[in-house]
Image: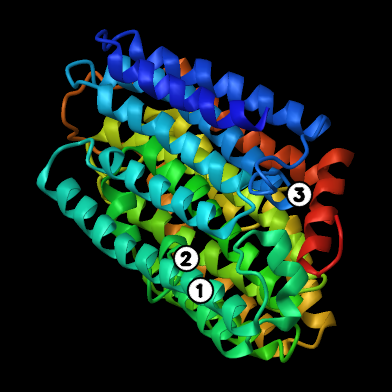
Amino acid sequence: MLHALVLIPLLGALIAGLLSDDQRRPLLLPLVALLHTGLTLAELWHPSGPAHGGWVQLDPLGNIVLLTISLLFLGCSIYAVSYLRHDRPERPNRFLCLSLLSCLAAMTLVCISQHLGLLWVAVAVATVSMAPQIYYNTNARSIEATWKYLLIGSVGIALALLGVYFLAYATLVAGVDATLQLESLLEVAPKLDQGWLRLGFVFLLVGFGVKLGLAPLHTWKPDAYGEAPGLVGALLAGGLTNCALLALLRVYQLMLAAGGDDRLYRVPLMVLGLFSMLVAAVFLVRQADFKRMLAYSSVEHMGLMVLALAIGKGALAGMLLHLIGNGLAKGALFLSSGTLHRVYGSKSTLGVQGALRRVPWSGSILLGGFLAVTAFPPSLLFLSEFTIITAAFRQGSWVAAVLLLLALAVVFLGMAPIVLGMVLGDPPSRLPSTSQRERLLTVLPPLVLLLLVVVLGVWLPPPLTDLVHQGAALLRGGCP
């Protein structure tokens, strides 16, 4: 089943590359996505054992990220059918469909990888496969965003590779069997050379921090998210960044198992997390481009999850809940914002007004998504942020908790006038003539994603609750 999770999207990508019909090709996306989601749920109920010498296996952390990505991709794939058929009928979609399915395969491989070398390869492939999607609009701004994404992302991937090398060298210096298999590394972690281990952590934190978009490593995000189609922005914000976070969680497990002074890795995590939230809060104020607004919101939420990782203990379960909620909510926001962009012909917050009157469904989803990501109950993000903040106060991290609350307040005050100005009032009197409008397949996916965030904020299914607790136990150094 683990092999099928990767091979089915790859087979779909191959068929998409060979198929010549631009009208039928997008139908491959929801077909593959349905199979992938079904296999993911089956894997949750009946887990497969380790394969290939323990290199491949789904543990609770991988399960959480894979489930989030699979549900998000399913929503994006259904949205893509209408987007490609009605909104871009003249544009060839071969490379977009091929790269979407290749990216799903690579992100799945990230989730099931239990070998740091294989994990690095999967993150690198997922990074490269996103580039054609960002460039899909083929204009000057999209090519600039694509080059910035590739250049900065390549630096991050290179630094992460150096970090992996340093971890491998730490085993050689310690005189133990050289390995990058996670379970073996965790067993010998206390024996590893601490100097090389810490150096490896620094490079991996910076390398994967670039993919997460942590400040000051976030400069690719506003351009890439702003110029990519809405469905691609959703996969960047809820898919690729979650894969990078999972890679960072693997490194965190290793540092925890190594013992020693935990301040050496908790303090950098806390500083980067808080700094990302504060930077995002500043740039969200009076933001003139609503897609860039969502990009800075992503920087804020990635910073929040890294901060929760630094706090540890009780905040870990909240972080995993936040991972799920943020991924689904960002999907709803980016898909609805994509519809607004096409209908109004503008990404300017001044050019998009009266959305509740002109596109009532997408305007309502944008408003609901804004309330969800700013942690209004009964959003799942309210539950996750409440858990993180409570844990911070209980564990004596008063400064972090106060700065966290301050950043959340500024983010809300920055986003509220922008979103309310977009959805309320009357549409502009002069709008470019366009045939773009809301359709069932462009409204239903973001609506379902948003409803999932709300329902999970009220009721967490027992299997999901158990999975989150098991994942948190792994991050505390225990067994799932």
Instruction: Count neighbours of disc 2 (C-alpha within 10 A) and say few if under 14, some if 14 to 19, many if 20 or more.
Output: many
Q: Earlier in the sequence, mark 3 or mark 2?
A: 3
Residue for point 43% across, 38% down = 103
N-terminal label among 3 and 1: 3
Dividing the picture into quadrants, the one containing residue 198 is bottom right
Q: Which type of secondary structure does the marked residue at label 3 adopt?
A: helix
Residue at 79%, 62% (x, y): give it.
474
Determine whether label 2 and label 1 are within 8 Å by CB: yes
Residue 438 appears anywhere in the view: no
* Res 44 visible: yes
Q: Nearer the viewer, residue 5 or 317?
A: 5
On screen, residue 39 versus residue 356, left or right, reads: right
Q: Is residue 195 left or right of residue 283?
A: right
Residue 208 is marked as 2
Residue at the spot of label 3: 60
The residue at 40%/28% (across/down) is: 359
Secondary structure, mark 1, is: helix
Whole-percent x and y of residue 38? 67, 22
For the residue carrying disc 3, how many other residues have a C-alpha within 10 Å: few (<14), some (14-19), or many (20+)? many
Marks 3,2: beta carbons within 8 A: no
Task: Assign the C terminus to one quadrant of the image.
Answer: bottom right
Residue 72's quadrant in the figure? top right
As drawn, the label of residue 372 is: none
Q: Which residue is mark 1?
A: 205
- Graded by Cα atoms within 10 Å as few (under 14), some (14 to 19) or many (20 or more), the crowding at tag 1 reads many
Q: How is the image coloured?
A: rainbow
Q: Is residue 73 above or below residue 250?
A: above
Helix, strand or loop under label 2? helix
Three-letter code for the amino acid on which mark 1 is drawn: Leu
Query: Real-space Cα distance between discs 2 and 1?
Result: 5 Å
